[in-house]
Amino acid sequence: MIMKMIGRELKLKLANDYSKFAILPTNRSIDSKHVQKMIASIRKMGVLRAVITTTTNIIEGETKTYVIDGQHLATALEREGQPIPYIDIAIESEEDLVEKMAYLNNSSKSWDLMNYINAWKMIRPDYMKLFKWKNMYDIEITMLAAIGINNAGIKYSTSSIKTGNFQITNPKAEEMCKAFNDIFLKIGMSDRSVKFQFLAAFLQAYGTYNHTKVMSNIEKHMKTVKLLTDGDSTGTYIRTKIFNLPK
């Protein structure tokens, strides 16, 4: 079967040999509950779309056919013993692969930042560092990225992370992640907005930062810290009482 897409013809193929398909290590993990839903859908309505693949040697130096979209559908069809309909598309580079994966997956279930980091980390060392930090410290990824560039403003624009352009420019990022993790553990009960205010003050103070003093201040003011909510007065309180910064 020939399908037309943006002026191009795409050939729909059928595969009964499930072993021909490889799963990209950067793709989402298989969710067995989602596979069960796909099986129920297939039994009720049949197969309504194709799996998208690419055949390349770019990834592992060996030519393989990778599933880049529809891995749950492919798994469900294998479970049902049905042939897998697929369309094989060309990729030009590893970057091109990540971008096409993002477009394809976002058409069904949007990627979160960790999906982008997981995809880019194989070809971008700085993304591998972010991935490592996330595993070491259970801190929101945008906070870790902010430490990586010493700028809390990344909270408002994460496009550089999504497009593969994020770079760690802060030479003290590793030690700062460790220090902020101690703070994060102390204020774990706080609202997300309050945590970001702590982060902003932490980044501002780090040039003259005294970790022991800051941890002592948090403990000293813990009753108030637990009651903090978003607002300018909260930011002022955190800067002056916790980090000993001017208003």
Image (cartoon, rainbow, N blue to C red):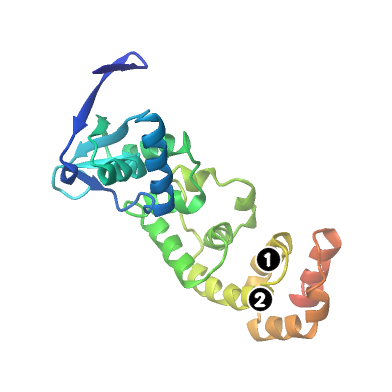
Amino acid type, label 1: Gln
Q: How far apart are marks 1 and 2 (CA)?
A: 9 Å
**Is residue 166 placed above or below 176 in the rendered structure?**
above
Image coordinates of residue 70 in percent, x first then y, are: 35, 39
Q: Residue 208 carries which label?
A: 2
Q: What element carries label 1?
A: helix
Residue at image coords 81%, 63%:
229
Q: Foreground residue, 240 or 45?
A: 45
Residue 138 location (% of width, % of height): 53, 69
Residue at the extreme front of the image, as rendered: 44
**Relative horizontal placement of residue 205, taking residue 159 as reference (left or right):** right
Front position in the image: 101 or 40: 40
Which residue lies most toward the top here? 7
Report the front residue among 194 and 146: 194
Q: Which residue is drawn at 78% across and 80% down?
A: 222
Is 178 displayed left or right of 207 in the figure? left
Quarter of the figure with residue 66: top left
Name the residue beneath numbered marker 1: 204
**Residue found at x 47% / y 50%:** 166
Instruction: From this view, report whether residue 122 is shown above or below residue 58.
Output: below
**Residue 247: percent from left, percent from top:** 83, 66
- The kind of residue tagged 2 is Thr
